[in-house]
Amino acid sequence: MRDISKYQGILPAFYACYDAAGDISPAAVQALTSHLIAKGVRGVYVGGSSGECIYQTLEERKLVLENVMKASNGALTVIAHVACNNTHDSQLLARHAEQMGVDAIAAIPPIYFHLPDHAIADYWNDICSAAPNTDFVIYNVPQLAGVTLTMPLLREMLKNPNVVAVKNSSMSVQDIQKFLYEGSRDGREFIVFNGADEQLISGLVMGAAGGIGGTYGVMPELYIKLFDLFRQGELKKARSLQFDVDEIVYELCSGRGHMYAVIKEVLRRREGLDLGGVRPPLPGVDAKDEEVITRSVALIDAAIKKWR
């Protein structure tokens, strides 16, 4: 019997960590991991969008995961996103992730070519075959992948016993209900992660076991508090906190630099973490982003003080 309780709660999507030359910084990866452990998160989602995976080589992605696992030393649930835009490389990362002892692997569908459902199912099942002893999480992010998880595709994937969850980043919270209902039929243990940060409370109401999000790492205290308020039945307070979080998210997204570039600068100023910048072609911050960064720091500080 699987222990799916390890997938509940707040799991930040791990940020790419670079040195001054723009290469992966093992020291920064370990520092961020230790920082998140100290903040009390349940786990991390490594190598996804926040990890800038599509701009990194296989060896770089392996290096990141190796250092997360080294620093976490069993203290975190670790889900490794292993998708590449071809099956062979995805299998290499899946095999490596299993060797590292992760709790689960995850994958988006292949991007660029619009593949039929049966080809996507083959791709995901082939990835699973490379890590046969590891749970698998389907990542549904249609606004970026250009492919939507359909119910027929989910039903096909549920034939694979390794499939335990969907990370749902579509903007329709109804999808969480649909995926959870389908995955839980016949008594199967199945969970759905909320992936849209701005809708965490909505996702939890619809049955999400927890959340995986790109802004969790810059303000984990607030998301942990929101999750706790929801579990305690304090829905009015949880909604109010969600509104405060959303104001911060909107600010983080308002700069010329990419959101993750802004986030890394906020982390540097608030927490003393130097994670480098973002990898081109993602735009970094510039002088015109100073007001956005300053406001973001102030909003996070104020919200943490308010909800402490």
Image (spheres, grey):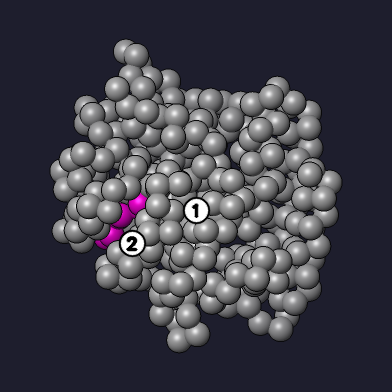
* Quarter location, residue 190: top left
Q: State the residue position of label 1.
A: 13
Q: Local crowd at mark 1 within 10 Å, few (<14), some, or many (≥20)?
A: many
For numbered disc 1, what is the local secondary structure? Answer: loop
Q: Residue at x 82, y 50 (%)?
A: 305
CB atoms of marks 2 and 1 within 8 Å: no
Q: Give the main secondary structure of the magenta stretch.
A: loop
Q: Residue at x 61, y 51 (%)?
A: 39
For this orientation, the residue located farthest to the top is: 186
Q: Which residues are magenta?
A: 80-86
In which quadrant of the rendered image does the N terminus lie? top left
Q: Is residue 61 magenta?
A: no
Identify whether 79 is placed above or below 151.
below
Q: Judge from the rendering whether residue 181 lies leftward or rightward of residue 284; answer left or right.
A: left
Which badge, 2 or 1, is on the more N-terminal residue?
1
* Quarter location, residue 35: bottom right
Q: Residue at x 71, y 76 (%)?
A: 289
Q: Residue at x 34, y 42 (%)?
A: 103
Q: State the residue position of label 2.
A: 66
